[in-house]
Image (tube, helix red, strand yellow):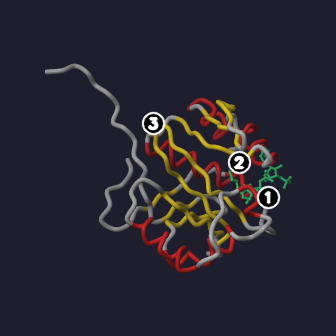
Amino acid sequence: MSNDIRPLAPRLRKPARITGRQLVFHDAGPQDAAFILGLRTDPKKSRCLSVTANDLSRQIAWMERYEADSSQVYFIIADVDGRRVGTVRMYDQQGTSFCWGSWIITDEVPSSYAIESALIIYHYALLLGFQSAHFDVRKDNVSVWTFHERFGAVRAGETDLDFLFTISHDAIQRSLRRYAKYLPDGIKVEFPPGAADAS
Ligand SMILES: CC(C)(COP(=O)(O)OP(=O)(O)OC[C@H]1O[C@@H](n2cnc3c(N)ncnc32)[C@H](O)[C@@H]1OP(=O)(O)O)[C@@H](O)C(=O)NCCC(=O)NCCS
C-alpha cells in the first residue's frame, strides 16, 4: 500500500447562486445572452476585451455550449434587488491555479461592487480548494491591472498586448482579510438540486 497521500485536486463547479454582502452571483445561461452581449459590445466596456460579434443568436449558442462545459463557471453579477450589474468568469484550471476574467461591471453602481466581486471570486475559489490564480490584463487597461496589483497580484510575464499576472495563496488570504469589511460574513454558496455540496 502506498503512503503517498496527495490533496484532492480542486475542480471548478457551477453553483446556482453565491450570496455576498451587496452582490449575488448566478450561474449564467442563454437567458442572459442579450445582457452579456450588451456589455461586451459596449464601446467603452469592451475596449480591453477580446472582440465579441454583435450577434445574439451566436451569443445564445455560446451560452448553450457553456451550460454543457464543466471547465468554466460564468457568473452573472446581480445586486440584492436582482438587477444584473455585470459578469465574471472562472476558467483555464492549471493544477491548483484558476484563471478569472470576462470581468465587467455596469456604470452607475457603487464603487464597492468591483472589490466585493473580486473577493467573492477568491472566496469561492479557496472554498473549492484552489491555491492561486492567474490572469492576463491588457497593458493599456491601467486601472484594472492597478486594481489587481493592489490585491497582491504580481507580473509573471508579458506579451506585446498583455501583462500576465499570478496571485499566490498568501496574497489572496491577505486581501480577503484586508478587505473583509466589503464581505464581512463571507459567502453563502448554493448548488443546484442534486449536486453535492462543496465541503
Ligand atoms: C473591470 C471592472 C469591473 C473593474 O471595476 P471598476 O469599478 O472600474 O474598479 P475600480 O478599479 O475603479 O475600483 C472600484 C473602486 O474601488 C477602489 N479600489 C479598488 N481597489 C482597491 C483597493 N485595493 N483598496 C481600496 N480601494 C480600492 C477604487 O479606488 C474605486 O473607488 P473609486 O470609484 O472611489 O475611485 C470595470 O472597470 C469594467 O467593467 N471594465 C471594463 C471591462 C474590462 O476591462 N474588464 C477587465 C478585463 S481583464
Q: Calculate the distance from the C-alpha at mark 1 to the C-alpha at mark 3.
A: 30 Å
Question: Local crowd at mark 2 within 10 Å, few (<14), some, or many (≥20)?
Answer: few
The numbered mark, 1 or 3, whose residue comes first in the sequence reads 3
Q: Quadrant of residue 151?
A: top right
The three-letter amino acid code for the residue at tag 2 is Lys
Could you say where residue 79 lies in the image, as x and y percent from the top left?
A: 66, 69
The numbered mark, 2 or 1, whose residue comes first in the sequence reads 1
Q: Calculate the distance from the C-alpha at mark 2 to the C-alpha at mark 1.
A: 14 Å
Question: Local crowd at mark 3 within 10 Å, few (<14), some, or many (≥20)?
Answer: some
What's the mark number on residue 181? Answer: 2
Residue drawn at x 13%, y 21% is 1
Please indicate whether residue 150 sits to the left or right of residue 90 in the image: right
Q: Is mark 1 within 8 Å of ligand 1?
A: yes
- Vertical placement of residue 60 versus 146, above or below: below
The mark closer to the camera, 2 or 1, is 1
Could you say where residue 69 lies in the image, as x and y percent from the top left?
A: 40, 60
Question: Local crowd at mark 1 within 10 Å, few (<14), some, or many (≥20)?
Answer: few
The numbered mark, 3 or 2, whose residue comes first in the sequence reads 3
Q: Nearer the viewer, residue 24 or 90?
A: 90
Q: Calculate the distance from the C-alpha at mark 3 to the C-alpha at mark 2.
A: 27 Å
Residue drawn at x 77%, y 67% is 109
What's the mark number on residue 111? Answer: 1
Q: Is residue 94 visible?
A: yes
- Vertical placement of residue 160 versus 3, above or below: below
Residue of label 3: 96
Please indicate whether residue 41 sits to the left or right of residue 16 in the image: right
Residue drawn at x 73%, y 55% is 48
| Residues at marks 1 and 3 touching, judged by CB atoms closer than 8 Å | no
Residue drawn at x 71%, y 48% is 181
Q: Quadrant of residue 154?
A: top right
The three-letter amino acid code for the residue at tag 1 is Ser
